[in-house]
Amino acid sequence: MEIASIEDFYRDTASLIPESLNKEIGHFNVFKIADLFASKEMVMPYNRRAYYKISLINGRNKAEYADKVIDIEKNALLFATPKIPYYYSPLDNEQSGYFCIFTDSFLAKSNSGTNLEELPIYQPGGYPIFQLTDESYADINHIFEKMFKELSSDYAYKYDLLRNYLQELIHYGQKLQPASALYPTHNASARVSSLFIELLERQFPIDSPRQKLQLRTASDYADQLAVHVNHLNKVLKENTGKTTTEIISSRVVQEAKILLRQTDWSISEIAYCLDFEQVAHFSTFFKKQTSMTPLGFRSLK
């Protein structure tokens, strides 16, 4: 599957990569949406990106993921992670706001004390877009204005300051999440749940038709975690409301949708990658989960 790099982003937006940014550890930049929108139609293709992106959006837009479509009527804050592909398009010509892009190395734990993959805002299954009130929009806009101004300064420690502004944005978004997502119970069952999700997500994305899932059943995960499969199922049910098999199936069908939509791989190749012995088994599974056949879903492209 094609993954858009930082270089691809600058080429597609007809922007120059600032030489000063390349000399720093990691990569960070911030843009005014109106500036890019005026020079080029700002339609983001449906793919994965090799960088993180946070957008403050003012205008009517649509963001489409494999499993949901989100309409933005006015103000919104969008968090994009390299793990989840999405398609983004404006629905009118009145677009403003800011967005910033950065690599995981820019906000690496050694530089910032932050582990991006452990943050609630970037956990799988989360909601990546928050509709904003005018007051919240003004608050976040002020953070972006400070970032935009600081980027062109000659302050010796400006990148440390920019990391602080970036973390302020992330924490603002996390405060918009339900409290249950921010304050998980720190006990043994929560740890088992967390390790299960980590194992599950580690298998994705599927980037080659020769890549195959190594863990596919509840028993596979229980063995890896050294717990009884009944205990794993009980723990996940308590912490997520879903069984082990339901969580695995949901993630597998999400990846199946991405592969059907984003690649030209055959149904047989996709079935193989997702560890189905026969195409018929994959088709039955997919239809049970989505009420559509794989071919039917692909035809919606």
Image (cartoon, grey):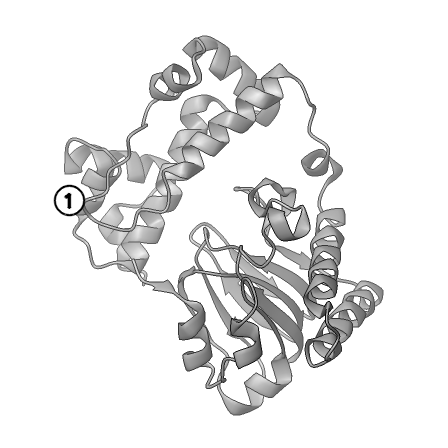
Crowd band around label 1 with a 10 angstrom C-alpha radius: few (<14), some (14–19), many (20+): some
- Residue in view at x 72 percent, y 79 percent: 154
Q: Quadrant of residue 282?
A: top left
65 in relation to 56, above or below: above
List x then y, in percent, for residue 111. 64, 53
List x then y, in percent, for residue 290. 37, 42
Look at the image and tell me whether residue 23 can be seen.
Answer: yes
The residue under label 1 is which amino acid type? Ser
Residue at numbered disc 1: 268
- Residue in view at x 65 percent, y 46 percent: 114
List x then y, in percent, for residue 256. 32, 45
Q: Residue furthest right?
A: 135
Q: Residue furthest bottom?
A: 39
Look at the image and tell me whether residue 297 can be seen.
Answer: no
- Residue in view at x 56 percent, y 74 percent: 21
**Total numbered badges shown on the rendered structure:** 1
